[in-house]
Amino acid sequence: MLPKIINVTVKDVRFPTSTEQHGSDAMHTDPDYSTAYVVLHTDSELKGFGFTFTLGKGTEIVVCAVESLSRLVVGKSLEEIVRDFRGFYRLLTSDSQMRWLGPEKGVIHVATAAVLNAVWDLWARAEGKPLWKLLVDMDPEQLVSCIDFRYITDVLTEKEAVDLLLKAQEGRQQREDQMLSEGYPAYTTSCAWLGYSDQQLQQLCADALRGGWTRFKLKVGADLEDDVRRCRLIRQMIGPNNTLMIDANQKWDVDEAVSWVSRLAEFKPLWIEEPTSPDDILGQALRYRFSETHSQTETITSPFSLKCHNRVMFKQLLQASALQFVQIDSCRLGSVNENLAVMLMAHKFKVPVCPHSGGVGLCELVQHLILFDYICVSASLNNRMCEYVDHLHEHFTSPVVIKDAHYLPPKDPGYSCEMLDSSVQRYQFPDGEVWLQMNK
């Protein structure tokens, strides 16, 4: 018998990363990496752990949203949930009153992700498998039954999804063995936060190069001349053959993005991430068409990432040929269920998935998703990599393992969501030891 959920607790946990400018970018100048941390308590010894990522202020609002959703979860058995996971996903996202707050976007959706992440963690623990292995071992029909295809059937039907997974079964065991021995390729954003000094950027970049890193992402968008200088600095540091990406975090209008990126094209970035509003699908498509017809920006591609808030937005971006990289997010989208839908749509459109990560625990989560994508969906590492940020892993019971700039597959059962009790207590806001000391 699988356990029954008898209680849901959620805590506001915040880390004062703004004091050293970790995570700073053109739009988010003083982020305190934070999380609404969820624990599913059951009638057995098993617990499920989950969270969603926030930047400090407002985490208390997400906590309230999780508490509102918890009434839909308490009393459910894990067996009942996984037998109709699509139905459970819709239960959380389609409550006739709470869906008015979204639907499937904003605070209510990231709160839904926190709850669903905990459910997936609980299921993987009950099966004694890491989440990626739980997904890999599912037959295509069972896996697809977890996905809500509502609003995306004009692009991907349930039958098409099953067929895509069946076609990818050839060589699956070899790919799994490859991941276990080599790991999944990663890129780093840890060197080049916008608030870092040149000296700090150079030191971190030099350390990363010695550690075997060959792919680097730089935050841009606050000041054009400063961006030119910093791009030149990091390109000189990493050399002409290593990979550079840039990220504006939604800073520009469409025309401004085109002009700005034209100046930065000489540094040959692989992509420009979040150049404009995350909701401006037509603007993003226009920006892409400009890069196709103007030689000075022909090297620039244009992915969306963290703020693309649901599968419908991704569907439209893919339909509009508005991106060349898909950047899923394990907490912005509706957990594993919705990420499965986006990965399958991306595969149908032949667009590589390069997940967004970082924050608090996002690396721990998204590594599971990208391992599944390679083993069971894309079967390709061409132009594919997963973001890595070297912050706050020490607060998790099963932190990511990086070797030679590759994610090594997690081995512990679950979704790698569990935080150390001592960290939760010390950093709980506003009464944890760290915050009481800071607010004296």
Image (tube, rainbow, N blue to C red):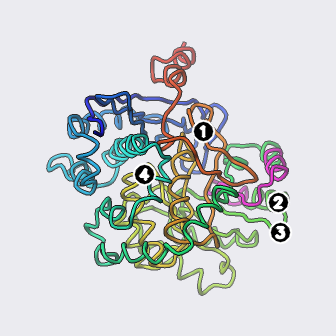
Image point 49% across, 74% down: which residue?
Answer: 168
Q: What span is in magenta?
A: 203-227
Q: Secondary structure at mark 2?
A: helix
The amino acid sitting under disc 3 is Pro
Instruction: Decide whether residue 282 is among the magenta residues.
Output: no
Mark toward the viewer: 1 or 2: 1
Can you give x and y, in whole percent of width and height, for residue 13 in the image? 47, 29
Q: Secondary structure at mark 3?
A: loop
Total labels: the figure holds: 4
The amino acid sitting under disc 4 is Arg
Q: Residue furthest bottom?
A: 293
Report, in whole angstroms, how far the alpha carbon at label 4 lies from the one at label 1.
21 Å
Can you give x and y, in whole percent of width and height, for residue 176 in the image? 59, 61
Vertical placement of 128 versus 254: above or below?
above
Can you give x and y, in whole percent of width and height, for residue 30 in the image? 57, 38
Asked if the residue at tag 3 contacts the one at tag 2, i.e. Cβ–Cβ closer than 8 Å, the answer is: no
Name the residue beneath numbered marker 2: 238
- Residue 318 occupies quadrant: bottom left
> 153 or 130: which is nearer to us?
130
